[in-house]
């Protein structure tokens, strides 16, 4: 009976040893995969950061162009207003000169 118990324990030990080796191998594979995923995630985060900076740069550039366009539009409107006033004033002066010339 001792021999049977010894053999039973020996088989159980062999089973546990095999399970331990398989578990350690699985743990190594999972750790390697986790490391790979962490590296990929870091790379993706860097890429996201680069894209976010580029997005901000482009947004700033767009805003600056919009500001410049608005400034140019306002300047054009003001110039048109001034030109209109000058034309009106010129017409008035020409009319006054004609009237003065006719009176003389």
Image (cartoon, rainbow, N blue to C red):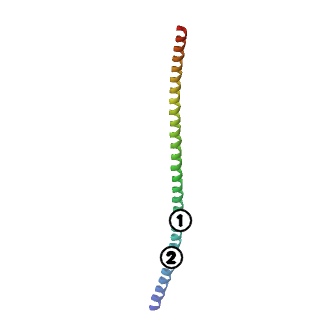
Above or below — where is 21 with respect to 32?
below
Between circles 2 and 1, the one closer to the viewer is: 1
- Residue 46 location (% of width, % of height): 52, 59
Residue at x-position 54% and y-position 8%: 102
Residue at x-position 53% and y-position 37%: 69
Residue at x-position 50% and y-position 76%: 24
User: In which quadrant will I find the C terminus?
Assistant: top right
Residue at x-position 50% and y-position 50%: 56
- Residue 84 location (% of width, % of height): 52, 23
Q: Nearer the viewer, residue 28 or 89?
A: 89
Above or below — where is 16 with respect to 31?
below
- Residue 32 location (% of width, % of height): 53, 70
Above or below — where is 79 with respect to 56?
above
Q: Label 1 neighbourhood size at 10 Å, few (<14), some (14-19), many (20+)? A: few
Would you say the residues marked 2 and 1 are in contact, meaning their CB atoms lie under 8 Å apart?
Answer: no
Q: Which residue is mark 2?
A: 24
- Find the residue positioned furthest to the front: 104
State the mark number for residue 39: 1
User: In which quadrant will I find the N terminus?
Assistant: bottom left
């Amino acid at each position: 009976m001792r021999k049977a118990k010894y053999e039973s324990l020996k088989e159980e030990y062999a089973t546990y040893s095999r399970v331990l080796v398989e578990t350690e191998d699985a743990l190594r594979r999972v750790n390697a995969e986790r490391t790979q995923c962490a590296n990929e995630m870091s790379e993706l985060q860097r890429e996201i950061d680069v894209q976010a900076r580029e997005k901000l740069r482009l947004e700033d550039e767009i805003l600056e162009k919009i500001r410049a366009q608005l400034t140019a539009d306002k300047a054009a409107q003001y110039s048109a207003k001034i030109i209109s006033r000058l034309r009106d004033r010129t017409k008035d002066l020409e009319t006054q000169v004609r009237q003065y010339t006719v009176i003389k």
